Image (spheres, rainbow, N blue to C red):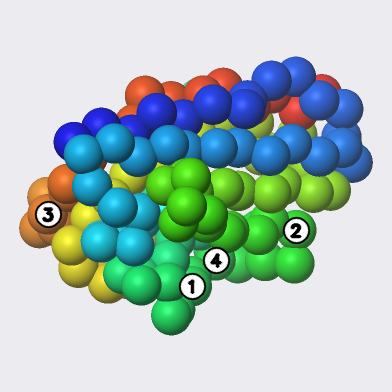
Amino acid sequence: VQLQASGGGLVQAGGSLRLSCVASGFSVDEYAIGWFRQAPGEGRKGISCTSKSHDETYYRDSVKGRFTISSDNAKNTLYLQMNSLKPEDTAVYYCAAFVQWPGPCSVIGGSFDTFDFVSWGRGTLVTVSS
């Protein structure tokens, strides 16, 4: 099982980017799946996730109204549309599939140790300049 994230880059504040995460070895609606990010000097945290079968979504307060998670089952791909980007959105973004819902996605300042991850993708760097 594997996840491959892409789409990061350098963008000015107020700009947009779309991240993609292609799954292989399993279906994107087979597990809860979502986006996490890790800023310099900080721990990894959930940003936006969707439940198995995509009937529920979660957004961290800091991205609500600006980021949108979606998926294309035919392409077995998860997306994160990021609009109105801010310098504080600068981070390495990861996609991950996991079992519990909302599980690690809603953890604030805690550990992911109690959750079961199916796969983590390699990160893609998003840099937002002011």
Q: From the viewer's perspective, is 49 left or right of 84? A: left
Q: Where is residue 90 in the image (x, y as percent from the top left)?
A: 64, 31
Q: Name the residue under label 1.
A: 57
At 30% from the left and 52% from the top, the residue drawn is 27
Q: Does dot 2 land on a helix, a strand or a loop?
A: loop
Of callouts 3 and 2, which one flags the residue occurring earlier in the amino acid sequence? 2
Quarter of the image holding residue 100? bottom left
Alpha-carbon neighbours of circle 2 within 10 Å: few (<14), some, or many (≥20)?
Answer: few
- The reply to whether callout 3 and callout 4 are in contact (CB within 8 Å) is no
C-alpha span from label 3 to label 1 = 18 Å
At 75% from the left and 58% from the top, the residue drawn is 66
- The reply to whether callout 4 and callout 1 are in contact (CB within 8 Å) is yes
Which quadrant: the C terminus? top right
Q: From the viewer's perspective, is 76 left or right of 62? A: left
Q: Is residue 39 visible?
A: no
Q: Does dot 4 land on a helix, a strand or a loop?
A: strand
Which quadrant: the N terminus? top left
Q: Where is residue 42 in the image (x, y as percent from the top left)?
A: 43, 34
Alpha-carbon neighbours of circle 1 within 10 Å: few (<14), some, or many (≥20)?
Answer: some
Q: From the viewer's perspective, is 61 left or right of 117? A: right
C-alpha span from label 4 to label 1 = 7 Å
- Mark 1 is on which residue type? Thr
Q: From the viewer's perspective, is 47 left or right of 8? A: left
C-alpha span from label 3 to label 2 = 28 Å
Q: Mark 3 points at which residue?
A: 116
Of callouts 1 and 2, which one flags the residue occurring earlier in the amino acid sequence? 1
Of callouts 3 and 4, which one flags the residue occurring earlier in the amino acid sequence? 4
Quarter of the image holding residue 49? bottom left
Q: Does dot 3 land on a helix, a strand or a loop?
A: loop
Of callouts 4 and 2, which one flags the residue occurring earlier in the amino acid sequence? 4
Q: Mark 4 points at which residue?
A: 59
